[in-house]
């Protein structure tokens, strides 16, 4: 598999980069992520599980059975790709 | 919609960036794209139609009823994002 295909295998899923982008601002709770992104809870849970398995983010233990998520170094390394895609999206003509 | 979401609306589909990456090397015929990418023909046709509608690529008229595709300026502008994703994919640890 090419390096590009390997990257898209992990972050090519519909919402993955939007989740990573949210978490670039800092760790967030499950409920806050869901509200910010307006995603269905099943799909959010699936994407979070996949991104955790791929080493992009990790679960933080919180009190009161609350879940929160934070990017790993590997996840933060996606910021260059996200910035490039955002700039491309802004140039829509 | 944010600029990032707008970009992913167009190139967030499973194979879209792999197709654009192939075409960064130059215009290609439908059959060659299919062979290079190993995609099903229905999915390739769908992605090409979407990317054409979004102004990312255009169809070239060829003789003998052959179809070929080339990136527009807008499509070529995705190379920065593709490079960033490829580098991220290469750093898999």
Image (cartoon, coloured by chain):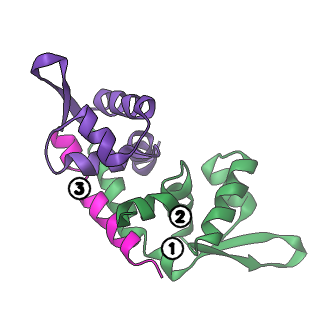
Chain colours: A purple, B green
Q: Label 2 is found on which chain of the structure?
A: B
Q: Which residue is mark 1?
A: B75
Q: Which mark is residue A79?
A: 3
Q: Quadrant location of residue B60? A: bottom right
In this figure, what is the number of numbered marks? Answer: 3
Taking A35 as reference, is B60 above or below it? below
Label 2–label 3 contact, CB within 8 A: no
What is the C-alpha distance between the residues marked 3 and 1?
21 Å
First to last magenta residue range: A72-93
Q: Residue at x 32, y 34 (%)?
A: A51
Q: In this figure, which residue is indicated by the disc labeled 2?
A: B20
Seen at 69% across and 49% down, the residue is B43
Residue A71 position, x and y percent, is 19, 40
Q: Position of residue A23 (x, y in %)?
A: 21, 45
Q: Find residue B26 and name its label.
A: none
Vertical relation: A34 (above or below) B33:
above
Q: Are marks 2 and 3 on the same chain?
A: no
């Amino acid at each position: 598999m090419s390096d590009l295909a390997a990257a898209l295998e992990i972050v090519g899923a519909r919402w993955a980069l939007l989740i990573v982008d949210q978490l670039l601002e800092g760790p967030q709770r499950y409920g806050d992520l869901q509200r910010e992104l307006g995603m269905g809870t099943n799909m959010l849970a699936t994407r979070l599980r996949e991104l955790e398995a791929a080493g992009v983010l990790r679960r933080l233990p919180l009190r009161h059975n609350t879940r929160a998520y934070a990017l790993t170094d590997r996840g933060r390394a996606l910021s260059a790709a996200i910035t490039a895609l955002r700039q491309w999206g802004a140039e829509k003509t």
